[in-house]
Every structure is written in structure tokens, then in C-alpha cells.
Amino acid sequence: MKISNGTVVGIDYSLHLGDGKVIDASEPAEPLTYLHGEGQIVPGLESALEGLSAGDRKQVTVPPKDGYGEHDARGVQEVDRTAFPPDFQPQPGMELTAEGEDGEPVPFVIREVRGDKILIDLNHPLAGKTLFFDITVRDVREATEEEREHGHAHGPEGHDH
Ligand code: ZN
């Protein structure tokens, strides 16, 4: 069976940003499982997997616009040191989560600490990055009716949420 909309796909993957240093990967024998065509993985990867079958391997290069988007300069903001707890030691590169107006989680990264001012970046950490995936397709099957209704894949034990 080939990967197309409405198939449930299991892939082993690893991701690097051009230097070969793996920053994310599936666990051995635990493929990432998703319902194809629902935008559950980055668009550039999803379209590159179309038509592959179990056992196929592929290297996929995804430009920012088909990955996590371009880096938006408006997402870089200066905030007062006092916005953080007094005993907190901000360090460049820290990934944190703030609470938005409606209580939703807002992830951000600390870029710079300039005395009383802290430069934060609200972009996705992978925004503006070209993504290099190594993919092995492990499994392709037809989605069940229930999975299609829900718009996502279910685990081997069936409904698990
Ligand atoms: Zn479900």
C-alpha cells in the first residue's frame, strides 16, 4: 500500500539542521504514527512521503516555508527582568512557557540578557530553519472509520484518549 490521504503511516525519523547533528528522532522500534493528509506533521515532510510504501527510505529537505515557517522579527521582544520571578536566572537559549491572555501556553526562547532587559523570541525554535529528515517507512495501512472521523491515528490498542 502506498501513502496517500486516509492512510495511517508509521515512520522512523531523525532530524538535523544541515550539520548532521541529530536534534530529534523517533525511539528505536517506536515509529511515529500519524494519519496522512491531516497536517499532523510539517507540510513539506507530509507531501514528500506521498506515494512511498513500507520499507522505503528517503532523505527529505524541507525549507522553512514548508516547515515551521519563516522567522518573524515581530516575535522578538524586549521584556523587563521584573517579568520573571526574582530568583530566576535567565540564560540565553532557555526554552520557557508563559501564559497567554486566555491561559493558553505561549512557548518562547530567551535570546539575550541585557542587564534589566531580556530579549525573548516567540517564534517556534525551528522557525527559519531548513529541516533535514532521514525517513524509513515502517508501516502503511488504511485508516479505520473511527480514525477518519477523529482526524488522527489510534494506537495498536485502539482508542486511547
Ligand atoms: Zn480518536
Image: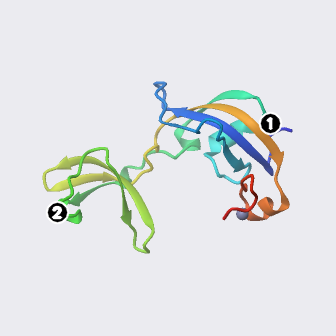
Q: Please name the residue that numbered disc 1 is placed on.
A: 51
Q: Nearer the viewer, mark 2 or mark 1?
A: 2
Give the SS element for disc 2.
loop
Between disc 2 and disc 1, whose residue precedes? Answer: 1
Locate residue 1: give its quadrant: top right
**Disc 1, ligand 1: is the CB inside 8 Å?**
no
Locate residue 43: give its quadrant: top right
Farthest residue in the bottom direction? 102
Colour scheme of the rendered structure: rainbow
Give the SS element for disc 1.
loop
**Residues at marks 2 and 1, CA–CA distance in whole angstroms:** 54 Å
Q: Mark 2: which amino acid?
A: Pro
Q: For residue 140, which numbered disc appears in the image?
A: none
- How far across and down, in percent of the image, does residue 94 sit? 32, 48
12 relative to 89, above or below: above
Farthest residue in the front direction? 157
Q: Residue at x 63, y 47 (%)?
A: 41
Asked if labels 1 and 2 touch by Cβ distance under 8 angstroms, the answer is no
Q: For residue 86, which numbered disc appears in the image?
A: 2
Quadrant in which the C terminus is drawn:
bottom right
Q: Nearer the viewer, residue 93 or 68?
A: 93
Q: Mark 1: which amino acid?
A: Gly
